[in-house]
Image (tube, rainbow, N blue to C red):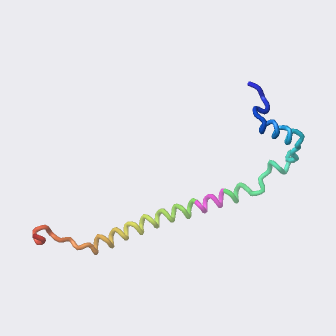
């Protein structure tokens, strides 16, 4: 398997970027600018908010089902005929 440009566009791209240099090899490039504890705290808060939202949604659904069930009027088939 050959390495290199396979068509005309690839050849042009190789020629264009052959001499480019990247200067991201310093020590600061690999260190995070956000502390791991802050990130874990933010993720934990987000997960707790989502969990609470799901629990509230479930409770609200049960209340709505209850209200609908109480307001329903059931007619027996003997009375309807």
Nearest the viewer among 47 and 61 is 61
Q: Residue at horizontal 85%, vertical 47%? A: 24
Q: Whole-percent x and y of residue 3? A: 78, 29
Nearest the viewer among 30 and 73 is 73
Occupied quadrant, residue 40? bottom right
Q: Main secondary structure of the magenta part?
A: helix
- Image quarter where the C terminus lies is bottom left
- Image quarter where the N terminus lies is top right
In this picture, residue 54 sits left or right of residue 3: left
Q: Is residue 32 above or below residue 67?
A: above
Q: Residue at horizontal 54%, vertical 62%? A: 50
**In this picture, which residue range is highlighted in magenta?**
40-46
Q: Whole-percent x and y of residue 42? A: 65, 61
Q: Is residue 6 above or below residue 69?
A: above
Residue 73 lies in the magenta-colored region: no
In this picture, residue 75 sits left or right of residue 31: left
How many marks do you count on the picture?
Answer: 0
Occupied quadrant, residue 62? bottom left
Occupied quadrant, residue 74? bottom left
Q: Residue furthest top?
A: 1
Q: Is residue 62 above or below residue 21?
A: below
Nearest the viewer among 63 and 48 is 63
Q: Residue at horizontal 63%, vertical 58%? A: 43
Q: Residue furthest front?
A: 8
Nearest the viewer among 20 and 33 is 20
Q: Whole-percent x and y of residue 10? A: 78, 37
């Amino acid at each position: 398997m050959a390495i290199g440009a396979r068509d005309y566009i690839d050849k042009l791209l190789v020629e264009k970027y052959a001499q480019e240099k990247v200067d991201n090899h310093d020590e600061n490039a690999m260190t995070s600018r956000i502390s791991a504890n802050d990130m874990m705290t933010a993720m934990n808060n987000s997960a707790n908010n989502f969990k609470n939202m799901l629990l509230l949604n479930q409770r609200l659904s049960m209340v709505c089902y209850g209200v609908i069930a109480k307001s329903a009027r059931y007619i027996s088939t003997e009375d309807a005929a």
